Image (tube, rainbow, N blue to C red):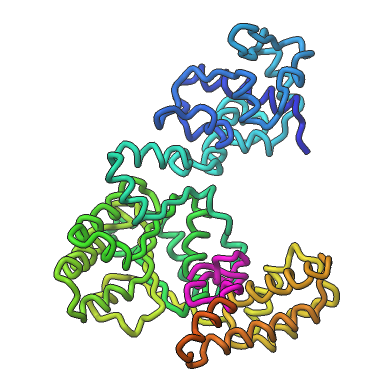
Amino acid sequence: MSNPELDVVEFLLTTAVYNGDRDLDEDDLPPAYRQVFWSDGRIERPLSATGGTTTDATGVERPWDAVGDLMFTDRDDFSGDIEFTDQELAEEWFLDRADEERIRGNPTLAAEYGAEFDVTHAEAREANRPARADRVWIDSLLDEYFDDEEEEEMLDLVDIRAPEEVEMTMDDLVLTGDQEGEIHKIVKAIEHRDYLAQIGLREIGKLLFVGPPGTGKTSVARALAHDLQLPFVEVKLSMITSQYLGETAKNVEKSFEVARRLAPCIFFMDEFDFVAKTRSSDEHAAIKRAVNTLLKSIDDISLIDDEVLLIGATNHPDQLDAAAWRRFDEIVNFPKPDRGMRSDILRVVTREMDIIDFEPDELAKITEGLTGSDLRLVLREAVLSALTEERTTLTQQDLEDAVADFEERDNLKNLDMIDGDADALVAGGDISGGSDDADHAHDGHDHDHSHDGEADD
């Protein structure tokens, strides 16, 4: 439960300690505090605890009202700064009321007072989201690297997300045993990069996710970025090689340079089968050069040396040739979920729903062949149908009816269309949002399909 008085004093004390200890840096400030002090990609001392910065950092609307009656606080009417008149008294007051959890969440205070709570500065810092994962840090780096025209083009080609902008976590996903094993191995490789470099094992950290749309490839990659607190850089290969013909090789190089600049990060290349299609076709020579540049760039980038975890994803592994396959040291299969996984996905996706007589195992039996994202769409339709009847409580029958409706729409998509009828049917079926593009994870988000609810590929 929030304590406005204690929250404000913690913020004031953090700014005071940070200003006085030059060994502390941005990674020692809690993310909520950092966000109010970023300027031109840097946080410069002294930090000033005004009414505005205090509110933005703590969420306390009237910070001076919260602490104005304390005998060790004062406010400068001209600058608006809230200050301590007696820092030692403020420290004593705070330490009497703080607990281990609060100190563990604030590396600056852990460096100063951690011993009193059996919390080390190192563990608090390790648990704190690093500054390089902040959206403002990412944006400042991109602003520095690209001029306005170049940046506008790159934003069309590359989707960059800060970890805080990724809603899903690995705990939200339902994975196969093989998927869990491969993810665990790569997490350990990231944790022990220095050791791997020491023993000369550098050919690691390039994964290829393969499987049909909607089975969670993109969701798992994004969830990894969230859990590892790494920037997420996503590029769709077909876009790189088609939108700016004549600049294709340059665009490939730029996208890899973005990943290197944001390192450590996850670099996710979607539609990797486009490489195979291009290499085996009579496409424009500029596109073929871009693909060759891509393959060379994959060879040159490294988790160990560049701190970039590279993940490719394809819905069509059968179209990849040997040159594409050998670029990856691990292949992770994303099959359609079996009955047990479908049941688990339904449990995850419905965690916040009120459903009478809910039997996910029974639903799993009648949803054979559906992916995590398909199941999400089924539940969405059940919710919307209930809302048309002014209900927010669902029944098992609502869900079974939604399954039947989904299968009917899915069958319509597979019909041979007669001229003039296609647009009408597509318009009607598009409400479901279901298409081969809905290849998400099974996690529980509209854009996911890994094995827990849904993902992006």
Residue at point 57%, 72% (across, down) = 433
Tell me the quadrant of the picture where the N terminus can be found: top right
Q: Is residue 95 above or below residue 184?
A: above
Magenta residues (range):
429-457
Where is residue 324, by image quadrant? Answer: bottom left
Q: Nearer the viewer, residue 188 or 116?
A: 188
Instruction: Check if residue 400 falls in the magenta segment.
Output: no
Q: Position of residue 317 (x, y in %)?
A: 36, 81
Does the magenta segment cover residue 447?
yes
- Prevailing secondary structure class for the magenta stretch in the rendered image: loop
Q: Left or right: 417 with respect to 203?
A: right
Q: Is residue 417 left or right of residue 142?
A: right
Counting every numbered tag in the picture gives: 0
- Please, is residue 89 above or below residue 189 in the view? above
Of 131 and 429, the residue lying toward us: 429
Q: Position of residue 289 (x, y in %)?
A: 16, 66
Mark yes or no: residue 301 visible.
Answer: yes
Where is residue 3 drawn, in percent x and y?
Answer: 77, 31
Q: Residue at x 55, y 65 (%)?
A: 447
| 192 over 72 or under it: above or below | below
Q: Does residue 290 appear left or right of residue 114 in this picture?
A: left
- Left or right position of 30 against 277: right
Residue 194 shows in the view: no
Q: Residue at x 65, y 12 (%)?
A: 84
Residue at the location (33% across, 76% down)? Answer: 273
Q: Position of residue 36 (x, y in %)?
A: 54, 29
